[in-house]
């Protein structure tokens, strides 16, 4: 156990499984390749397995840790480091604008707490205009859902929403034995790069998100059935897609077209 973690009893409610295997720590940091011109944001630094190598390489490192004890240990450990700031905060309640004026090219890093990984992802996607890239570790199944293509059994709401905001690349798996305590699940590292130029632009992004959520709400239903709650039957029949299809058969462009067509009809 490294020095900062000694004596800390891992808290399940905060999803605390700490990386211990030096090879995986090295591989993750190598995948990020932080540089002196980079502004990194680490979500959930925990007892600092990734924090130290990041702090040594990055021009600036902001860390967001919800656990007061761990945040306090990190504050003590990095007290003399001018490029490191520790925030005792909940990432789900933090506005990136608080990081200051130049926080618009953030490199986000984190071994995310699995119990809140989906809400954290959706929050980061909303802020993707301020983010250069994100290298994050998640439960393997979540990474499979993030990177799945239409037709795949893992393809769903997360795949479509991610494809809208960024390019996602699965980097490598990490076994449970790399952590302490050993988690019940397998993990994987994924890299997300927000599109500078979106391949598709929805006229109303909130409504687009609603269309995707509603479509996948009940995967076995056809689109005709799922979308009933969002538009009248005659509007649905005019949509540029096959309404007998199931949600996993449609790609990003289809969802944007559906969203735009229903939204345009509402404005009439
Ligand atoms: N990065 C460390 C590592 O790799 O060993 C710890 C990873 S552990 C899976 C997740 C970390 O996120 C814990 O330190 C936990 O306290 C912190 N955390 C959990 N929920 C959080 C939240 N809402 N905001 C910020 N940090 C959170």
Image (cartoon, rainbow, N blue to C red):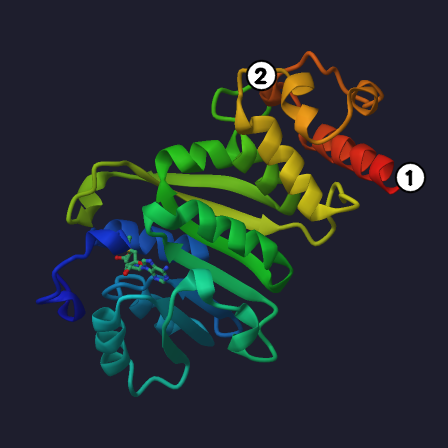
> Residue shown at 54%/66% (left/top)?
106
> Residue shown at 60%/40% (left/top)?
161
Indicate left or right for 37 with 63 as reference. right
Question: Total label count?
Answer: 2
Question: What is the CA distance from the residue labelled 1 to the residue labelled 2?
Answer: 28 Å
Task: Check the image and report above or below for 234 versus 75.
Answer: above
Indicate left or right for 70 with 258 as reference. left
The percent coordinates of residue 5 (x first, y second) are 16, 66
Tell me the residue that label 1 is attached to. Answer: 268
Which label belongs to residue 221? 2
Residue 33 shows up from this direction: no
Point out the tag, 1 or 2, that comes first from the N-terminus.
2
Indicate left or right for 192 with 86 as reference. right
Circles 1 and 2: CB atoms closer than 8 Å: no
In-front residue for pair 146/37: 146
The percent coordinates of residue 202 (x first, y second) are 76, 43
Q: Secondary structure at mark 1?
A: loop
Residue 68 shows up from this direction: yes
> Residue shown at 59%/59% (left/top)?
127
Bin the neighbour count of mark 1 within 10 Å (Cα to Cα): few under 14, some 14-19, many 20 and up. few
Res. 26 image quadrant: bottom left
Nearer the viewer's eye, disc 1 or disc 2?
1
In-front residue for pair 165/226: 226
- Residue found at the very far right of the displayed protein: 268
Q: Quadrant of ligand 1?
A: bottom left
Q: Secondary structure at mark 2?
A: loop
The percent coordinates of residue 251 (x first, y second) are 67, 27
Bin the neighbour count of mark 2 within 10 Å (Cα to Cα): few under 14, some 14-19, many 20 and up. some
The quarter in which the N terminus is drawn is: bottom left
- Residue found at the very far left of the displayed protein: 7
């Amino acid at each position: 156990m490294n020095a900062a973690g000694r004596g800390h009893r891992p808290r399940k409610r905060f999803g605390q499984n700490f990386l211990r295997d030096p090879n995986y720590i090295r591989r993750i940091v190598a995948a990020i390749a932080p540089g002196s011109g980079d502004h990194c944001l680490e979500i959930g630094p925990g007892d600092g397995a990734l924090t130290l190598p990041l702090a040594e390489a990055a021009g600036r490192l902001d860390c967001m840790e919800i656990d007061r004890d761990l945040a306090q240990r990190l504050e003590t450990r990095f007290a003399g480091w001018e490029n490191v700031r520790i925030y005792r905060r909940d990432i789900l309640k933090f506005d990136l604008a608080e990081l200051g004026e130049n926080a618009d090219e953030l490199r986000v890093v984190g071994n995310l707490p699995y119990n809140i990984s989906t809400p954290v992802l959706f929050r980061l996607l909303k802020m993707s205009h301020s983010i250069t890239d994100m290298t994050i570790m998640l439960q393997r199944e979540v990474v499979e859902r993030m990177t799945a293509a239409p037709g795949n059994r893992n393809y769903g709401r997360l795949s479509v929403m991610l494809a809208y905001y960024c390019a996602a690349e699965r980097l490598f798996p990490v076994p449970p034995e790399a952590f302490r305590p050993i988690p019940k699940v397998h993990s994987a590292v994924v890299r997300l790069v927000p599109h500078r130029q979106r391949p598709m632009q929805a006229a109303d992004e909130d409504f687009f998100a609603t269309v995707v959520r509603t479509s996948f709400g009940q995967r076995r239903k056809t689109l005709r059935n799922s979308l009933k709650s969002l538009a009248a039957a005659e509007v649905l029949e005019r949509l540029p897609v096959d309404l007998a299809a199931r949600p996993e058969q449609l790609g990003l462009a289809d969802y944007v077209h559906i969203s735009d067509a229903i939204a345009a009809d509402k404005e009439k």
